[in-house]
Image (cartoon, rainbow, N blue to C red):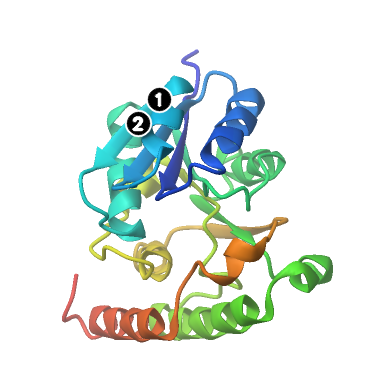
Amino acid sequence: MKKEKLAIVIPAYNEEETIGQTLDDVKKSFKGAEIFVINDGSKDKTREIALKHRVHVLTHIQNRGLGATLATGLLAATNHGADYIVTFDADLQHISADVNRMLAPLKKGKADATIGSRFLRTEDLEMMPRITLLGNRALTLITNILSGTQITDSQSGLRAFTRDAAKKILILCDRYEVSSEIIHELGKHNMRVLEIPIKARYDERSWKKGTNPREGINIFIGLLLKRLGLKK
């Protein structure tokens, strides 16, 4: 029987402080997995540190944004024959122990994709910065209304896909609106999506990262155009 291949896609932009520890954690937890670091035009030592960990490192010459980075990573993973693909942040927010629980429904044929949700357990919400909490709730509401989905955490960076699901996802946006675009694509193709409760770690950088109001408006406009059929 053919051994199933797991690929882990890690977007990274100026993550020299955390990329090494992230890769140590992932490599220890998932021996044999194909790991792809997508270095999105970093100006620090992100690329050099990743290369020392002997993983696949794909580099954008210029910073293109999270959407373009995930598109590069998903394409690389499917081209390498991955059966399951996980997207995993480089900033130590995610915990590798959550990944196996996200993969389980895919391997059992119960889902085409899983989304790690920080909104399913009260204790996880208590750790989230208030501005992140409010922003995510608003964007998730907009995403669900325009995509016909019922997701609690549309902006989660921890996701898992079967190979077939990953190949159907068409990413056209370059920046943070990609998180909502992925949810829209899953709904558009009537894929079976399950949410899995995950823990998330936050530090002072968490207040500076993520979507701002301007990007929130771009997300709304992009999804509205898709809903109206004016954008693929």
* Foreground residue among 129 and 192: 129
Label 1 environment density (alpha carbons within 10 Å; few <14, some 14–19, many ≥20): some
Tell me if 134 is positioned left or right of 79 in this view: right
* Residue 59 image offset from top left, x and y in percent: 27, 39
Q: Residue at x 28, y 44 (%)?
A: 72
Q: Which residue is mark 2?
A: 57
Residue 25 in which image quadrant: top right
**Which element is circle 2 on?**
strand
Q: Residue at x 66, y 28 (%)?
A: 29
Which of pointers 1 and 2 lies earlier in the amino acid sequence? Answer: 1
Q: Quadrant of the C terminus?
A: bottom left
Q: Is residue 94 above or below residue 205?
A: above
The residue type indicated by label 1 comes to Leu
Q: Is residue 108 above or below residue 198?
A: above
CB atoms of marks 1 and 2 within 8 Å: yes
Tell me if 126 is positioned left or right of 27 in this view: right
Q: Residue at x 50, y 52 (%)?
A: 113
* Residue 131 image offset from top left, x and y in percent: 61, 81
The residue type indicated by label 2 comes to Val
* Residue 225 image offset from top left, x and y in percent: 23, 83
Tell me if 230 is positioned left or right of 139 in this view: left
